[in-house]
Amino acid sequence: MADGPTINTIAERAGVSIASVSRVLNGLPTRQETVRKVMAAADELGYVRNAVARSLKSRRTHQVAFAMADVGNPAYLAMLRQIQPVLKAAGYRLVLHSTDAVVEDEIAVLHSLGERYVDGLIMVPLRVTEAHLRMLATARAPVVIIGSVPDGTRVDNVRADSRTGVRLALDHLHALGRRRIALVNGPLDTVPGAARGAAYREALGDLDLPYDEDLVRIGDFYRADGARAVAELLAARPDIDALMCANDLIALGALDVLRAAGRRVPEDVAVVGMDDTDLAAASWPSLTSVSLGSAERGKAAAELLLERLQGGESDPRVVTVPPRLAVRASTAGPAYGKYTDGKYTGETHAGGKEGGA
Amino acid sequence: MADGPTINTIAERAGVSIASVSRVLNGLPTRQETVRKVMAAADELGYVRNAVARSLKSRRTHQVAFAMADVGNPAYLAMLRQIQPVLKAAGYRLVLHSTDAVVEDEIAVLHSLGERYVDGLIMVPLRVTEAHLRMLATARAPVVIIGSVPDGTRVDNVRADSRTGVRLALDHLHALGRRRIALVNGPLDTVPGAARGAAYREALGDLDLPYDEDLVRIGDFYRADGARAVAELLAARPDIDALMCANDLIALGALDVLRAAGRRVPEDVAVVGMDDTDLAAASWPSLTSVSLGSAERGKAAAELLLERLQGGESDPRVVTVPPRLAVRASTAGPAYGKYTDGKYTGETHAGGKEGGA
DNA sequence: TTGTAGGCGTTATCAA
DNA sequence: TTGATAACGCCTACAA
């Protein structure tokens, strides 16, 4: 791994100055003869421009960071999958940060913007603390936050609307005749947990249904937590006829328990998940789920950031992505595909991509 | 966003030379008094070291690239989730490249190593072409390939063992008394497709089962392709009693069709998937699946690369990760969790993490 | 212990 | 049209 050639090497070889080499490489007006000599030398040497040196000089890295708690989380993954191509098309590389939902890690990422190894940052904080706000105020590069920040924070920000999302779900359940609708929520000190809890209560009110504390359970955002919560719920309130789950994993846990308890889904208990991940289509019965538009939020965030990077000095913008309800078998009853005669016509499963390697 | 402070700014403010500032910042022996002055100045100015300038000088970026076809693919995602923390712990940032399985993109990534924006690369090529080998031979930074490269290629490489993996599955099915085991494969011009096809044929031979072309179907690696293939298969060979699917998505498609056709799983037809993704545990019946150790391969690759980066100049190494069969309901019959008295005791579902935001 | 100066690989200015 | 030269921000001999 010998040292690669630099413009100096080329200059020598071509018998011109480094300035000329640089000009040719950047397509600035140069005599044809010189162009030829430089290109020839560059070719023979297998020259490739040093990105680090260019960055130092130009003060642009052509890199953007994306920071979220955990790539394994389908919601973040959906964002990532949209962010990546948008950035790539604009000539930016993507630096990935997993913060494991540790506040200090998020702060560290914000702080590290000062190192200038990226031109901008897209961040999805699980909670927004005072420390976040302080760092954001003095951030050394443009930042787009996916999630809600307090009004007045001078940061571009892309929001979900879980309030409307939860309402879509409850309206749907109500329209199906369900009246005892429980909520299986995540921790209340997370942004999504708090928002979904509040939205549930509000939507119930609008539907003239009573708010009953017994019908609300809190656990973590995992399948086992969902199972545990629903098991307790069934014991305490055997009469529930619908479950609103704060995410798809919780809903899968709910399905596990309902099956084990001999309750039919959706006949006895209808189940709604949230985030509309690939798991929703994969489960059986397939899961009705509220999509909060993770993919769209990722795309919007990337676009906002690119505008900033291309010089926009406007006021902070807020984009809100509308939710959507993906209705499947867990509320609407079996929607089996049909098999006849060697042909299968199925429901449209959101089918994630997969190769195997 | 005023220009951030540099060591010059600090030097002025502290009334010392930039060399002293640099020394203090790097913890080199310095008089206490000077240390104090420099630290104070740095603090007041909110100084952060410029990573780009450091890289230019040190010739190390502390960045590593990970290139694969598509993050949405659970197998790659599993790798990524292992790679990230290993690199992070070692002080490296992760640059993500999605190549969409386009060979030119992969070559471009290899080429871009010359730009020296990363210290090394982990790559998962879907196919390994001549062009790959040429680029690998002259790569300007250490590369670890996940997947198989021709013997003699001078590159560290981490392999799966799909041959043994397929054999595990077929042995399992055979032990369950299945004798007409079909294969639903992906494209034969991909590395995994070719390997799985060959392994199937070989394993059948070892089990003294006849190889029957009618029992082999080729489609793409997606759910709809799996459904289509299995629909045809059922029409052509209604007597099959087991399906070996080249990945989990194909297997989900198979389940769709079997359900629609009124075949019970596993009583009438047993189904095995491959890659053991989260979808396998989420589906119903839950899916027996061959794990090719994506996570382990990712981890191994990251560790190999780190060793290289820490100066290892040894010969190329080959690591092979053994497969594992995750047995679930789609072959072994229902393994329902139990619900009694407000408590749920379930099977251990591989539950991916999920937050929602 | 400290400061001066050169260099990492580019880009860009300014004369020639 | 070209070449010498000065940055970009940092590190590090080497000399003081």
Image (cartoon, coloured by chain):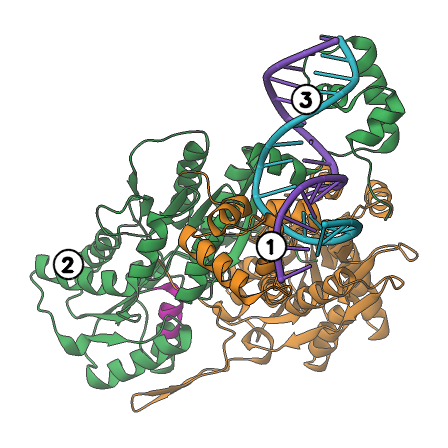
Chain colours: A orange, B green, C cyan, D purple
Q: Is residue B350 above or below residue A107?
A: below
In reply to whether residue B249 is colored magenta, the answer given is yes
The residue identified by callout 2 is: B203
Which quadrant is home to the C terminus of chain A? bottom left
Q: Say yes or no: labels 2 and 3 on the same chain.
A: yes
Q: Which residues are magenta?
A: B247-253
Spatial distance from mark 1 to mark 3, Cα to Cα? Answer: 38 Å
Considering the numbered disc 1 on the image, is that residue within a helix, a strand or a loop?
helix
Position in image of residue B142 (x %, y %): 41, 41
Residue under mark 3: which chain is it in?
B
Callouts 2 and 3 close, C-beta under 8 Å: no
Spatial distance from mark 2 to mark 3, Cα to Cα? Answer: 59 Å
Which quadrant is home to the N terminus of chain A? top left
Considering the numbered disc 2 on the image, is that residue within a helix, a strand or a loop?
helix
Seen from the viewer's position, the closer of residues B33 and A224 is B33
* Discs 1/2, front: 1
Tell me the amino acid under the disc marked 1.
Ser
x 36%, y 56%: residue: B328
Position in image of residue A262 (x %, y %): 50, 64
Who comes first in sequence, dot 2 or dot 3?
3
Q: Residues within 10 Å of mark 3 (few under 14, many from 20)?
A: few
The residue identified by callout 1 is: A20
Q: Residues within 10 Å of mark 1 (few under 14, many from 20)?
A: many
Q: Residues within 10 Å of mark 2 (few under 14, many from 20)?
A: many
Tell me the amino acid under the disc marked 3.
Asn
x 68%, y 22%: residue: B26
- Residue sitting at the far bottom: A341
The residue identified by callout 3 is: B26
